[in-house]
Amino acid sequence: MATVHYDGATRWYQGTERSAVDSLDLRIEDGEFLVLIGPSGCGKSTSLRMLAGLEDVDAGRVRIGETDVTELPPKQRDIAMVFQNYALYPHMNVADNMGFALKNAGRSKDEIRQRVRDAARLLDLEDYLDRNPKALSGGQRQRVAMGRAIVRQPQVF
Ligand SMILES: Nc1ncnc2c1ncn2[C@@H]1O[C@H](COP(=O)(O)OP(=O)(O)OP(=O)(O)O)[C@@H](O)[C@H]1O
C-alpha cells in the first residue's frame, strides 16, 4: 500500500460554470481506510477518477507514494477501483472476471487460480465461480467487482 496525496487537485468539465472538484487538499496515509461522504454531485467520484487517471487534473497534483501520477496513464498507477455500476464482463464467468487483470499481466494459470480462490473465499463467492454475472444478485455482483480489485493486490484500492 502507499500514501495518497491530493495537492490542490481541481477538475473543470467543459461547458460547466463551476468546477466539479475545486482545490482538493487531502493526504491519505499508507494503509488508511478512508470514506468520502457528501451530497450527490459534490465531487466524490470525480476525486477518485482523478486519482485513478480516468479524469484529467486541470490544476494541482496527485501523488501516490513518492510518485507524481498527475500525468501518468491509468495503467501505470497500480490502482484498483470498484465502479458504482460494477462494470463486470457479461460474457465471462465470475472466476474469469476476477482473474482477467492477472491474465492480462501475464501471471501463471496456477497463480491466477489461487488468488481468485483466496478472494472468493474472503468474499463468500466460492459457490459462484462458474456463473455469469447475469445470474447473480446485486450484492453478489458487487462482491465480484470487489474481488476483481482485491486479486490485483494494488498499491491503492
Ligand atoms: N462528464 C461530465 N460533464 C459535466 N459535468 C460532470 C461530468 N461528470 C460529472 N459532472 C458534474 O460534476 C459534479 C461532481 O460529480 P461526481 O460524479 O464527482 O459527484 P459525486 O459526489 O460522486 O455524486 P453521487 O454521490 O451522486 O454519485 C456534479 O455536479 C456532476 O454533475
Image (cartoon, helix red, strand yellow):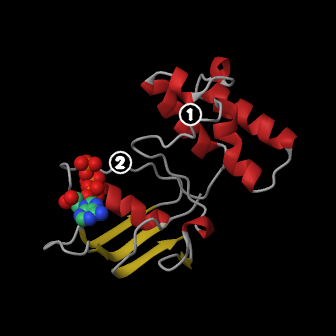
Residue 100 placement: quadrant? top right
Q: Is residue 142 among what the camera can see?
A: yes
Q: Which mark is residue 35?
A: 2
Say whether residue 48 is left or right of residue 13. right
The residue carrying pointer 2 sits among few (fewer than 14), some (14 to 19) or many (20 or more) residues within 10 Å by Cα, namely few
Residue 30 coordinates in the image, percent (x, y): 53, 59
How much space separates mark 2 and mark 1, taking CA atoms? 20 Å
Whether disc 2's CB lies below 8 Å from ligand 1 is answered no
Quarter of the picture containing the N terminus is bottom right
Please tell me which residue lies in front, 40 or 156. 40
- Asked which secondary structure carries label 1, the reply is helix
Residue at the image point whose x is 45% and y is 26% from the top = 139
Residue at the image point whose x is 40% and y is 59% from the top = 48
Say whether residue 5 is left or right of residue 143. left
Q: Is residue 30 above or below residue 8?
A: above
Q: Amino acid at mark 1?
A: Val
Residue 18 coordinates in the image, percent (x, y): 15, 72
Residue at the image point whose x is 56% and y is 36% from the top = 90
Residue 96 coordinates in the image, percent (x, y): 69, 37
Instruction: Please give the count of numbered marks on the rendered protein.
Output: 2
Please tell me which residue lies in front, 128 or 64. 128
The residue carrying pointer 1 sits among few (fewer than 14), some (14 to 19) or many (20 or more) residues within 10 Å by Cα, namely many
Q: Which residue is mark 1?
A: 144
Marks 2 and 1, the one that precedes in the sequence: 2
Residue at the image point whose x is 61% and y is 62% from the top = 78
Q: Quadrant of ligand 1?
A: bottom left
